[in-house]
């Protein structure tokens, strides 16, 4: 076997079709496709390829990294009514998706009730504008953030009419997101101007609907689903939040908001049921403290949801 054949076989064993090998005398040149890998993944694969290419007769190995530029996509997280935990889910999904290696940004599009600065431990940090675009604020969770809550004074009411709120959403979404691959949009409840602007102008790749199990929340969730269906935005699935409460003292389970309603509604509507998020004091206290549970190594609630959503997005791509 010639040197070039030996090098190609060795490199293919670690990089598969990602690598294209050339030889110039005793120097091996490798063009390595690193699309979809984060910084650590790219570095690790580059080192493996260099080691594999250093076969007898090879004196030097040069590796060139390439990657396809992916179009930034938008994931809308929506609900028909307020108080169902949509913002908490949005923050934790963004973090869980980022931990999977997706360059993720979070837009707090709940213009009238922004809560992401508290959830993402970014209160008091204001974004700056450069060349007419807002610069997202990095957080310690690997997710960049833009929120109306970063642009107004704390505890001040945002008394804007619909067109002003819709314009504010556009400024947030059109910020300078750089290499961000996925924007998670935490939408306000309902089906008003902000939602209409979002589906018409920014066109999400898909929407996740959040509801509690109770009938009243599910009625409003159906309205949100209908809005996206009419706009041609695919529904990724339904998440049931506040699904069961385990007493920390006696260990017994109770269902203050009912049980299984969202799963039954998803089946009735013919959309996927993505899973449940329990009603726990731990999630509430961690969120209030700016410590989203998805950032911890022991997360078993939001990581599976992010896995299902990422699988859906990858399938669409």
Image (cartoon, rainbow, N blue to C red):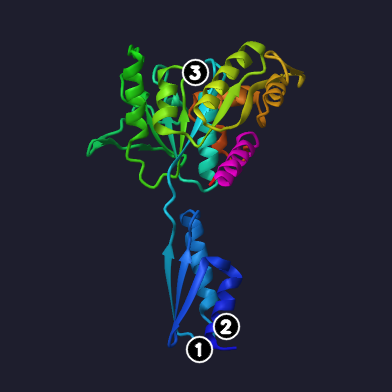
Mark 3, secondary structure of its residue: loop
Q: Earlier in the sequence, mark 1 or mark 3?
A: 1
Q: Mark number for residue 57?
A: 1
- At horizontal 40% and vertical 25% (from top left) the residue drawn is 197
Q: Of 123 and 5, which appears nearest the observer?
A: 5
Gap in Å between the C-alphas at discs 1 and 2? 10 Å
**x, y (%) of residue 220?**
58, 15
Residue 223: image location, x then y, percent: 56, 17
Is 183 magenta? The answer is: no
Q: Is residue 99 left or right of residue 201?
A: right
Cα separation, mark 3 vs mark 2, equals 60 Å
Instruction: Indicate the secondary structure of the residue bearing disc 2.
Output: helix
Q: Which mark is residue 189?
A: 3
> Disc 3 vs disc 2: Cβ atoms closer than 8 Å?
no
Q: Residue at x 62, y 27 (%)?
A: 239
Which mark lies nearer to you, 1 or 3?
3
Q: Position of residue 124 (x, y in %)?
A: 34, 27
Image disc number at residue 143: none
Disc 2: which residue: 6
Of labels 1 and 2, earlier in sequence is 2
Magenta stretch: dominant SS? helix
Mark 1 and mark 2 in contact? Answer it, CB < 8 Å. Answer: yes
> Which picture quadrant has residue 150?
top left
Q: Is residue 253 above or below residue 141?
A: above
The stretch of residues the image draws in magenta is 300-316
Give how far across and how far down residue 234 sits, in percent. 56, 33
């Amino acid at each position: 076997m010639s040197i070039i054949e030996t090098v190609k076989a060795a490199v293919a064993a670690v990089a598969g079709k990602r690598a294209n090998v050339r030889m110039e005398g005793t120097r091996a040149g490798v063009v390595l496709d690193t699309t979809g890998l984060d910084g650590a993944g790219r570095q690790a694969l580059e080192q493996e390829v260099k080691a594999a290419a250093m076969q007898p007769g090879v004196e030097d190995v040069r590796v060139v990294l390439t990657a396809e530029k992916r179009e930034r996509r938008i994931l809308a997280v929506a609900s028909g009514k307020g108080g169902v935990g949509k913002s908490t889910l949005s923050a934790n999904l963004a973090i869980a998706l980022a931990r999977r290696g997706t360059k993720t940004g979070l837009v707090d599009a709940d213009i009238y009730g922004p809560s992401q600065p508290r959830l993402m431990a970014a209160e008091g940090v204001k974004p700056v504008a450069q060349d007419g675009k807002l610069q997202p604020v990095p957080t310690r969770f690997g997710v960049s953030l833009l929120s109306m809550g970063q642009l107004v004074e704390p505890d001040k009411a945002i008394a804007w009419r619909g067109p002003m709120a819709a314009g504010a959403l556009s400024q947030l979404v059109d910020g300078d997101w750089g290499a961000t691959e996925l924007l998670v949009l935490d939408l306000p409840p309902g089906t008003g101007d902000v939602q209409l602007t979002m589906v018409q102008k920014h066109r999400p790749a898909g929407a996740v609907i959040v509801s509690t199990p109770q009938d009243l929340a599910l009625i409003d969730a159906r309205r949100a689903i209908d809005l996206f269906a009419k706009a041609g935005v695919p529904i990724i699935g339904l998440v049931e939040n506040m699904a069961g409460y385990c007493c920390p003292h006696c260990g017994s389970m109770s269902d203050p908001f009912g049980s299984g309603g969202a799963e039954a509604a998803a089946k009735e509507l013919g959309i996927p049921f993505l899973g449940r998020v329990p009603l726990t004091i731990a999630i509430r206290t961690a969120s209030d403290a700016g410590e989203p549970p998805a950032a911890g190594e022991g997360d078993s609630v939001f990581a599976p949801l992010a896995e299902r959503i990422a699988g859906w997005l990858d399938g669409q791509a």
